[in-house]
Image (tube, rainbow, N blue to C red):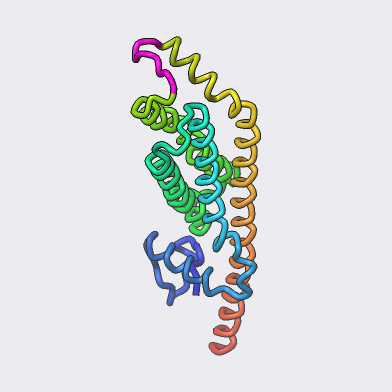
């Protein structure tokens, strides 16, 4: 049995009141036991799809910086591991807590707000995070192995020129990557909303049937 949201005055006498954590747990258990399973695919596979996409995007952006700094095989694990694992897991956790759980609890009545959250989290994990940390991490590796001349710390103009040179192949493709993240986040969030509406309507029908049955017994 899943959770139905009701006002206090509409609660039946035998209703079991749950706190937020219990309600979330019950909703997820119901989703994974729901039949047919394919109707709940956005909840089963949506979050992994978004997190994997964020990780793949991070790997691509990091690869562009590595090529720009001519790192070849140097520091491959040191640059890819922290830049890929963190956004993959953080994106998954934030999408679940800030978007999917809110859909299941019906606490945010504004679909546009949920879309905005999903897009913001996806862009932060798949674009902003690697664009901010990949240059720093790969510069450190480039300094260690002397693969490219790095300007002095105070030479801001030199750093800016090097950054433009390194990111030139990436900048032209970045808008397409941003659009892909936005479309994917909106699509998965929309599918989650529709899947939730589907099983919530089923719960309402079951509740009405139980209510009518109890009334018939009482009469």
Q: Is residue 166 above or below residue 120?
A: above
Quarter of the rendering occupied by the C terminus: bottom right
Q: Is residue 61 above or below residue 168?
A: below
In this view of the protein, which residue sits in the foreground, 51 or 101? Answer: 51
The residue under the point 44% across, 68% down is 26
Q: Is residue 174 above or below residue 110?
A: above
Q: Is residue 170 above or below residue 181?
A: above
Give residue 135's position: percent from left, percent from top: 44, 28
Range of magenta residues: 148-155
Would residue 154 appear left or right of 197 to someone viewing this image? Answer: left
In this view of the protein, which residue sits in the foreground, 58 or 102? Answer: 58
The residue under the point 57% across, 83% down is 215
In this view of the protein, which residue sits in the foreground, 77 or 120? Answer: 77
Would residue 185 appear left or right of 146 to someone viewing this image? Answer: right
The residue under the point 48% across, 58% down is 105
In this view of the protein, which residue sits in the foreground, 138 or 116? Answer: 138
The residue under the point 52% across, 56% down is 48
Magenta region's main secondary structure? loop
Give residue 78's position: percent from left, percent from top: 37, 40
């Amino acid at each position: 049995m899943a959770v139905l949201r009701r006002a206090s005055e509409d609660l039946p006498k035998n209703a079991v009141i749950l706190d937020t954590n219990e309600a979330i747990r019950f909703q997820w258990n119901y989703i994974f036991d729901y039949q047919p399973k394919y109707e709940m695919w956005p909840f089963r596979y949506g979050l992994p799809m978004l997190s994997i996409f964020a990780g793949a995007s991070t790997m691509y952006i990091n690869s562009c910086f590595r090529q720009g700094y001519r790192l070849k095989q140097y520091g491959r694990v040191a640059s890819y591991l922290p830049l890929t694992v963190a956004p993959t897991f953080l994106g998954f956790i934030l999408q679940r807590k800030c978007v999917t759980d809110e859909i299941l609890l019906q606490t945010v009545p504004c679909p546009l707000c949920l879309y905005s959250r999903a897009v913001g989290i996806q862009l932060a994990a798949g674009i902003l995070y690697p664009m901010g940390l990949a240059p720093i991490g790969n510069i450190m590796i480039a300094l260690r192995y002397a693969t490219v001349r790095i300007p002095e710390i105070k030479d801001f103009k030199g750093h800016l020129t090097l950054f433009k040179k390194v990111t030139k192949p990436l900048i032209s493709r970045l808008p397409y990557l941003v659009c892909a993240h936005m479309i994917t986040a909106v699509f998965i969030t929309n599918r989650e909303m529709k899947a939730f509406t589907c099983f919530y309507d089923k719960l309402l029908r079951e509740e009405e049937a139980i209510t009518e049955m109890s009334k018939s017994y009482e009469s």
